[in-house]
Image (spheres, rainbow, N blue to C red):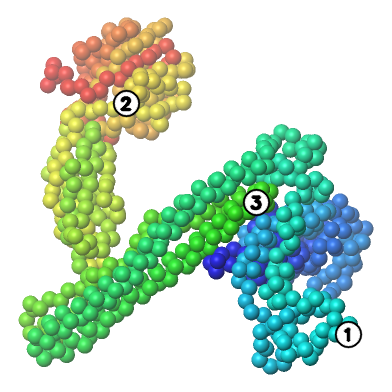
């Protein structure tokens, strides 16, 4: 039960709880301590916690003073006389000033205002009080005589009326069993302690009464307010629309929840105990490996010439420091883990004691807070908390090959550059114009790695460039050119330097582009369906939507099938920059190149310039093809597989995205992954 003692101590006085009360934040304080931390401030003054200065102009009140004033008290006039106490704190006359009383939790620092009931408005934690009493009885120790002048001996009796412990000689001398003292009752010390710590059976089992209605017992539980209530509380309508359930049912339910939460913490505590054993074994391994390493080092140094011998002492010192550093790290980890385990064990013991209680209302007063604490305690054993911070091996090597003149410079290599990573081909993949690569370090005894550098060439066999630098071992590279082959390689680095490159892997992007419409960049009136491949509009005005692909190299062809065509509108098809205007016809700004077409004719348009009128239009079922040739830097249009008009635009440079503008009279479906029409190849 020693580990549980911290759960039973008041955060204010540091002693075991005496008459504990429950604050709204679910923490507990002694009733006497609560009186000492009540803060009273006059109306209009800034509360102490909000002042910028370091002084406090408030005084502390006891429960009786505090309960005399409510928030409806009023003062007299604008001038309020005040006196000063010996410690310099202003004391306001109660009759002349409105007082505001509050109490701040010493653990979570949450403040709560007190009403006219004062501390009587907080529920007494009878369940915690009973556990403290049992704990005191279980730890009852020998009591010393209170009247011995020097070297007090163990008391043999305690006078119930005098409340004094006596040893046998002091009892005969100071409290003889005759005269007026003959009627005093003398008890054994252990029985006296038990009588002080443990309430009588009747009082311990007395059913809790309502705070607002002292004559009524708790018999229901308000789930919304998370507090026991009586029937009179329900009749008054305070919890009329709340979820109210029988007290015994909620008692059993919360006990079950607490037990389930304890199971998880118990598993973590078991793992922690096993981890401590692992750490202690690690200490032994480090000791043994350290001794072995020292012996090996001595053998190497003794085999060298006198110059190497002069260096031996320095090398041994460094090995010893390395060993001591590892030992210190493991010992610190043992200490830290032991402390966390002790806290967890203490909480578990406390919770088990709580579960033993047969007081439903008392249990429910603290069950929610305990459940959260248990769950939070389980969360603190995060992944990696039960893993050693050091390994028993020593990452130090001695090179005995150099010539004699290098011996004087012989030293430990504190670190090695990491080896070449191994690209995991089974995890590498290509999708459209995106590549995902994965790699790992190949050595069994992994050397420290601070990060990796992934490099790709330009797809034409040109120089490599860095595309990723970081600690992850998986990376996806987007925006590659279609129908291109890239060479990829990766290397690792640490404080000692950069390691060798991995083997080169060849990445082949898709021959043709597969893409959809992009809902993130579309105008808000655009309506997408069919997995973002079909588009229409809610507005009679033209609105723009872009594709998800971006092209800067190669030859690309896609089509749009006209699913609906009403009232002879003129949709526009083409390409655009990502920042083209979305609330007007495609091609009216300088960031789009398009062909707009109706049922009879078409025009090419860029920067609101209309050119090359061509006869022939579209109807329902027609297909419009767009050919973007970034090798020739041209844009050509097709209707129903036939080239429509001359080459529309030339000298196109940069990055282009497929684009469409339409209104509510048109619906089209995007068709991608198409080969370039053979008629122009």
- Residue at the farthest bottom position: 150
Residue 206 in picture, x, y percent from top left: 75, 53
Residue 626 image-quadrant placement = top left
Q: Quadrant of the C terminus?
A: top left
Nearest the viewer among 571 and 227 is 227
CA separation in Å, label 2 and label 1 = 107 Å
Residue found 21% across the figure and 13% down from its top: 641
Residue under label 2, please give it: 516
Q: Which residue sits at x=12%, y=89%?
A: 307
Residue at left offset 27%, top offset 76% = 287
Check disc 3: other Cα within 10 Å, few if <14, some if 14-19, many if 20+: few
The residue at which mark 3 appears reads as 358
Does residue 105 appear anywhere in the picture? Answer: no
Rendered position, 625 above or below 18:
above
Q: Secondary structure at mark 1?
A: helix
As drawn, is 358 to the left or to the right of 621?
right
Quarter placement of the N terminus: bottom right
- Residue 392: image quadrant is bottom left
Taking depth in this image into account, of 519 and 296 the one nearest to the observer is 296
Helix, strand or loop at mark 2: loop
Crowd around label 1: few <14 · some 14–19 · many ≥20 (10 Å): few
Q: CA distance from mark 3 to mark 2?
A: 65 Å
Q: Which residue is mark 1?
A: 179
At a point 12% along the width and 44% down the height, the residue shown is: 461
């Amino acid at each position: 039960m020693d580990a549980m003692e911290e759960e039973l101590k008041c955060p204010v006085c540091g002693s075991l709880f005496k008459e504990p009360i429950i604050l709204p934040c679910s923490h507990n304080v002694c009733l006497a301590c609560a009186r000492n931390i009540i803060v009273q401030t006059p109306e209009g003054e800034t509360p102490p916690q909000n002042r910028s200065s370091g002084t406090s102009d408030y005084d502390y009140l006891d429960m009786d003073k505090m309960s005399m004033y409510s928030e409806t008290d009023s003062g007299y006039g604008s001038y309020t006389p005040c006196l000063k106490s010996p410690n310099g704190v202003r004391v306001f006359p109660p009759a002349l000033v409105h007082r505001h009383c509050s109490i701040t939790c010493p653990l979570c620092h949450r403040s709560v205002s007190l009403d006219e009931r004062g501390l009587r408005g907080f529920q007494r934690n009878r369940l915690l009080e009973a556990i403290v009493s049992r704990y005191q009885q279980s730890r009852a120790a020998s009591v010393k005589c209170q009247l011995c002048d020097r070297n007090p001996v163990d008391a043999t009796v305690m006078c119930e009326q005098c409340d004094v412990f006596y040893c046998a000689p002091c009892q005969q001398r100071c409290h003889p069993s005759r005269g007026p003292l003959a009627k005093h009752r003398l008890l054994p010390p252990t029985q006296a302690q038990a009588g002080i710590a443990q309430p009588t059976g009747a009082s311990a089992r007395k059913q809790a009464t309502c705070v607002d209605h002292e004559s009524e017992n708790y018999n229901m539980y308000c789930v919304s307010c998370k507090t026991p209530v009586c029937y009179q509380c329900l009749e008054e309508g305070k919890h009329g629309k709340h979820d109210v359930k029988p007290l015994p049912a909620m008692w059993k339910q919360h006990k079950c929840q607490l037990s389930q939460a304890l199971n998880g913490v118990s598993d973590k505590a078991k793992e922690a105990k096993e981890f401590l054993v692992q750490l202690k074994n690690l200490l032994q391994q480090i000791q043994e490996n350290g001794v072995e390493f020292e012996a090996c080092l001595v053998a190497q140094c003794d085999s060298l010439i006198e110059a190497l011998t002069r260096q031996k002492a320095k090398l041994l010192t460094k090995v010893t420091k390395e060993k001591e550093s590892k030992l210190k790290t493991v010992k610190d980890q043992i200490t830290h883990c032991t402390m966390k385990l002790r806290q967890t064990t203490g909480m578990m013991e406390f919770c088990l004691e709580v579960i033993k209680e047969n007081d439903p209302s008392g249990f429910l007063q603290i069950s929610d807070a305990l459940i959260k604490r248990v769950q939070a305690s389980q969360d603190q054993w995060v992944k990696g908390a039960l893993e050693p911070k050091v390994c028993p091996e020593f990452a130090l090597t001695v090179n005995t090959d150099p010539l004699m003149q290098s011996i004087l410079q012989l030293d430990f290599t504190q670190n090695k550059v990491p080896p070449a990573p191994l690209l995991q081909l089974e995890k590498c993949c290509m999708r459209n114009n995106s590549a995902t690569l994965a790699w790992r370090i190949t050595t069994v005894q992994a050397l420290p790695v601070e990060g990796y550098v992934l490099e790709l060439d330009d797809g034409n066999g040109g120089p490599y460039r860095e595309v990723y630098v970081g600690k992850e071992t998986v990376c996806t590279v987007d925006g590659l050119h279609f129908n291109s082959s890239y060479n990829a390689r990766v290397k690792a680095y640490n404080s000692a330097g950069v390691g060798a490159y991995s083997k080169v892997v060849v990445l082949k992007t898709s021959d043709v582009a597969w893409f959809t419409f992009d809902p993130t960049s579309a105008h808000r009136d655009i309506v997408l369906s069919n997995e973002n491949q079909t588009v229409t509009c809610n507005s009679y005005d033209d609105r723009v939507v872009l594709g998800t692909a971006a092209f800067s190299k190669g030859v690309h062809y896609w089509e749009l099938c006209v699913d609906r065509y009403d009232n002879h509108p003129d949709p526009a098809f083409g390409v655009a920059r990502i920042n083209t205007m979305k609330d007007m016809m495609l091609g009216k700004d300088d960031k789009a190149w398009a062909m707009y077409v109706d049922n009879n004719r078409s025009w090419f348009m860029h920067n609101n310039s209309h050119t090359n009128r061509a006869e022939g239009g579209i109807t329902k079922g027609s297909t419009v093809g767009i050919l973007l040739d970034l090798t020739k830097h041209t844009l050509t249009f097709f209707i129903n597989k036939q080239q429509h008009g001359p080459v529309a635009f030339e000298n196109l440079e940069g990055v282009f995205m497929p684009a469409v503008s339409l209104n509510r009279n048109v619906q089209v479906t995007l068709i991608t992954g198409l080969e370039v029409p053979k008629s122009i190849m």
